[in-house]
Amino acid sequence: MLTYEVTLEVDEEWREAVADFMRHRHIPDIFDTGCFTSITFEEEEAGRFRTRYQARAKIELNRYLDDFAPDFRADFLEHFPSGVTVSRTIWWQLDEWK
């Protein structure tokens, strides 16, 4: 299992619009690609959001990055050409306690 994590630092004037776009369009559309088993969207504080995309294997993440990510990124930039800083990381699960 791995997590593809995307963090958004959003200017206050765009916070509500970005949250709405992510929750009602961007994330549901990405989930529909079938590349991820689950997706969580979180807000740390006003203006900072984190989306965690869970994939079973690197091949699924690579399929998303190769086949879908360019169009999703372009669409996001079309809606928010400024006011948002994006960072992306990949995490591999080493262990789990429940």
Image (cartoon, helix red, strand yellow):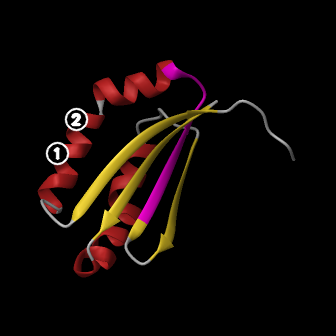
Highlighted range, magenta: 49-58
What separation in Å lies between label 2 and label 1 (alpha carbons)?
Answer: 6 Å
Give the numbered dot on residue 74.
1
Q: Is 42 positioned to the left or the right of 65 in the image? A: right
Up the image or down, 11 lies above or below 76; here it is: below
Which of the two residues, 93 or 35, is positioned nearer the viewer here? 93
Q: Which residue is mark 2?
A: 70
Looking at the rendered structure, the kind of residue marked 2 is Pro
Q: Is 95 positioned to the left or the right of 12 in the image? A: right
Is residue 54 inside the magenta stretch? yes
Q: Position of residue 46 (x, y in %)?
A: 42, 78
Looking at the rendered structure, the kind of residue marked 1 is Ala
Q: Which residue shows up at 72% across the image and 30% down it?
A: 94
Image quadrant of residue 9? bottom left
Q: Residue furthest right?
A: 98
Up the image or down, 52 lies above or below 93; here it is: below
Callout 2 crowding tier (Cα within 10 Å): few <14, some 14–19, many ≥20: few
Image quadrant of residue 22? bottom left
Q: Are circles 2 and 1 on residues that touch, CB within 8 Å?
A: yes
Up the image or down, 13 lies above or below 59; here it is: below
